[in-house]
Image: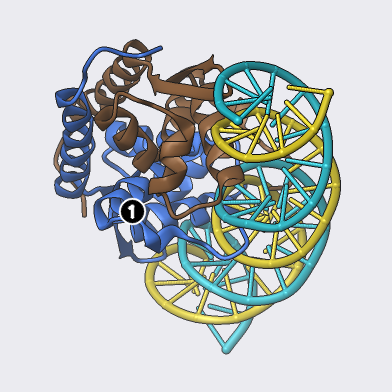
Chain colours: A blue, B brown, C yellow, D cyan
Amino acid sequence: MAIAKTNEFTQQEQDLAAFAKVLSHPARIAIMKVLAKENACICGRIVEILPLAQATVSQHLKELKNAGLIKGTVEGPKSCYCINWEAMEKFMQDFNGMFSALQLQKGKSCC
Amino acid sequence: MAIAKTNEFTQQEQDLAAFAKVLSHPARIAIMKVLAKENACICGRIVEILPLAQATVSQHLKELKNAGLIKGTVEGPKSCYCINWEAMEKFMQDFNGMFSALQLQKGKSCC
DNA sequence: TTCATTCATCGTACAAATACGATAAAATAT
DNA sequence: ATATTTTATCGTATTTGTACGATGAATGAA
């Protein structure tokens, strides 16, 4: 993107954008749904369900984990993932907070 | 991305991901904040505030408009933009709905 | 008309994201 | 000890996103 200007915005804007970016791919939303439904959380189970290769699923899981939306622990040769509800809830609150802040200044639309 | 598999997911997953993607850049979140605060909505005003070139701002505005989050009308040589509150509200509802659906299945986390 | 203003679009450069095969690492099973 | 299972990581190909200068189109001002 030719010299990212990302850090010229406020921290709040960067944080919200980062949260949105993690959920900006259908595969990652699908993964969150699988993790919520199946308490098993095994990586291989996700690979079975999603129409993606194992390497690709691992990559998406890594991004979700880096963003803090999910947690992962090793169980022998397997990997167990599950949703980090505290983080998820905080992000949703921030997101809704931004929307509420926008609405507060809602005047007569000019167009 | 080597053959997008985006359309192999459900429509709901694609829609939510598309909404998140539009807000996945701090510049576009900043634009929404400007549009909410200033009812003027003039493109040039946004260019003044953001640390980006005019062409770049126009590009971000186009994406927000394509996604339906903002509306734009021509006013002489100027362009007036403002938030599409109905669309924005619907998206927020869908987004919150997804989160609620996830929480409904929240059992004992395994990790 | 002529000039200035305002904005969208084009072309382009570069960065980041997406996808997967191949391989490595770690644990279990035989 | 050897083989199998499971997952992460590497390397790579391709697509998409980001950013901006330059240009053009449309309007208003001189």
- Relative to residue B110, is residue B64 drawn left or right? right
Q: x and y percent of residue A57 in the render?
A: 52, 49
Indicate left or right for C6 with A66 as reference.
Answer: right
Q: Is residue B76 above or below residue A17?
A: above
Q: Quadrant of the C terminus of chain A?
A: top left
Residue closer to the observer: A54 or A40: A54
D12 versus C18 height, above or below:
below
The residue that disc 1 covers is A14
Badge 1 element: helix
Between D17 and C10, the residue placed more toward the observer is: C10
Quadrant of the snapshot with the N terminus of chain A: bottom right
- Residue B83, can we see it? yes
Q: Chain of mark 1?
A: A
Query: Which residue is drawn at the image coordinates 52% and 24% (left, top)?
Result: B79
User: How far across and how far down the image is residue A94, in percent?
Assistant: 18, 41
Q: In percent of the image, x 39 and y 26: which residue is there?
A: B41
Residue at image location 28% in from the left, 35% down from the top: A36
Q: Does A27 appear above or below B111?
A: above
Q: Tell me the residue at 35%/38% (across/down).
A: A32
Q: How many marks?
A: 1
Q: Amino acid at mark 1?
A: Gln
Answer with left or right where residue B90 lies relative to residue A95: right
Question: Would residue A53 appear left or right of B85 to someone viewing this image?
Answer: right
Q: Which residue occupies the foreground of this view, A84 or A2?
A: A2
